[in-house]
Image (cartoon, rainbow, N blue to C red):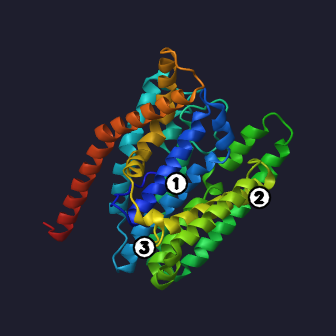
Amino acid sequence: MTQSTVTAPGGKLAGLDHLRALAIITVLFYHYRMFQHPRWLDEIMGFGWTGVDLFFVLSGYLISSQLFENMARGKQVSLPEFFIKRVFRIIPAYLVVLAVYFLIPAFHEKEALPPLWKFLTFTQNFGFDIKNFGTFSHVWSLCVEEHFYLLFPLVLVTMIHFNAERRGGQLLLAVLIFGFIARLLSWYLLIAPDAGNDTFGITWYKHMYYPTYNRLDGLLAGVAIAALFVFRPSVKEKITQHGNTILLLGLLVLTGAWFLVEDQKDFYASVFGFPAVSAGYGLLVVAAVSPGCFLYKYGSRFTALMAKLSFGLYLTHKGVIHLAQPLLIKTGLAPKGSLMFLLCLVVAVLGALLLNKTVEEPFLKLRQRVLERRRERRLNPA
């Protein structure tokens, strides 16, 4: 969700920007339904919750690709450099928006905020009560990604230390199996006993949807694609010759997943739905980096902008829309009209642009200076 790309007129990064734009637009449309909204939005956005899974696949692919490419070139995985990059990319904007939420109650889009310590420790997604603490709820997915950013490089360095790189495929399979077991146990031990009660939906979200151990499939799909492409270049060359076919296959898998998770909270959707969705989006990522795919060939200023602003939009969109819609209603616009919907999205984009220019870009420039100084000190020790 936070890994940015730099877009060329076409090519690998342009393709990924298209997908990042798709992910954030899907999330925006889906979350807009918590406000007054056009009826047609409910009809088309039943599958919209999966936009976050596309973010997971993209993050898994982009982060692990960087680390794997260093390994393939014989370079060490630098944990300090990795964490410097992540901290400067995520924490400043996140803390600014978090401060706005805690200092300006008018920014709250729903009920109460969870305790501050849960936001600061990225543990908000564990035991999360969405009914009573719905404000800034969407940060649960950032918690999942932060856990990945912390643990994945540590696991990688440990494997390198013990010369266990060749067991990476076995580890990926073990994590996949772990995900199935975790969801099965969550269902039978924590969720099924609440079936038929009014609190079932809240219980399902708390124990199935939000916890990191149940949402590893998207990240795992991204890591698997990156490992295959970096360490098996001949396989990558064969696969990426068929980009448009892979794109079509991905859309077919996602269509099947759509039907599988139509009732999001049933057993089969809960246990098998997440990996099915992740597999479909994984195929879209493969297509996006395939030279033969039109996603790779053609860039777009719109999707490049949306990709650039995606993290800021993700952080701020609910609060900004919550503030903007009542003001726009006072101008006489129909609260549930399509024009209201469009204007609220424009305001959300402007809010993200403001965050990008005042916080994200300055800290990314600072990050670059910090990394350059660190590399200079390493090359020219005193």
Q: Nearer the viewer, residue 26 or 227?
A: 26
Residue 55 - label: 1
* Residue 377 versus residue 261 in the image, above or below: below
Nearer to us in this view, 240 or 209: 240
Q: Are marks 1 and 2 in contact (CB under 8 Å)?
A: no
Instruction: Using a 10 Å C-alpha cutoff, classify the residue at mark 1 as few (fewer than 14 neighbours), some (14 to 19) or many (20 or more).
Output: many
- Residue at 36% in and 51% down: 301
Q: Secondary structure at mark 3?
A: helix
Q: Nearer the viewer, mark 1 or mark 2?
A: 1
Where in the figure is residue 298, as x and y percent of width and height? Answer: 40, 61
Q: Secondary structure at mark 1?
A: helix
Question: Residue placed at 69% from the left, 43% from the top?
Answer: 205
Q: Which residue is mark 2?
A: 184
Are there few (<14), some (14-19), or many (20+) residues within 10 Å of tag 3?
many
Mark 2 neighbour density, 10 Å: few (under 14) some (14–19) many (20 or more): some
Which residue reaches farthest right?
196
Q: Secondary structure at mark 2?
A: helix
Q: Earlier in the sequence, mark 1 or mark 2?
A: 1
Above or below 260: residue 247: below
Label 2 close to label 3 by CB (< 8 Å) = no
Amino acid type at mark 3: Phe
Horizontal arrangement in the rendering, residue 220 relative to residue 96 (left or right): right
Q: Amino acid at mark 2?
A: Leu
- For disc 3, the marked residue is 68
- Residue depth check, mark 2 versus mark 3: number of the one nearer the observer: 3
Q: Whole-Å distance between the Cαs marked 2 and 3?
A: 32 Å
In this rendering, would 25 be left or right of 372?
A: right
- In whole angstroms, how far apart are the C-alphas of marks 1 and 2? 24 Å
Gap in angstroms between the C-alphas marked 1 and 3 = 20 Å
Give the mark, 1 or 3, whose residue is nearer the N terminus.
Answer: 1
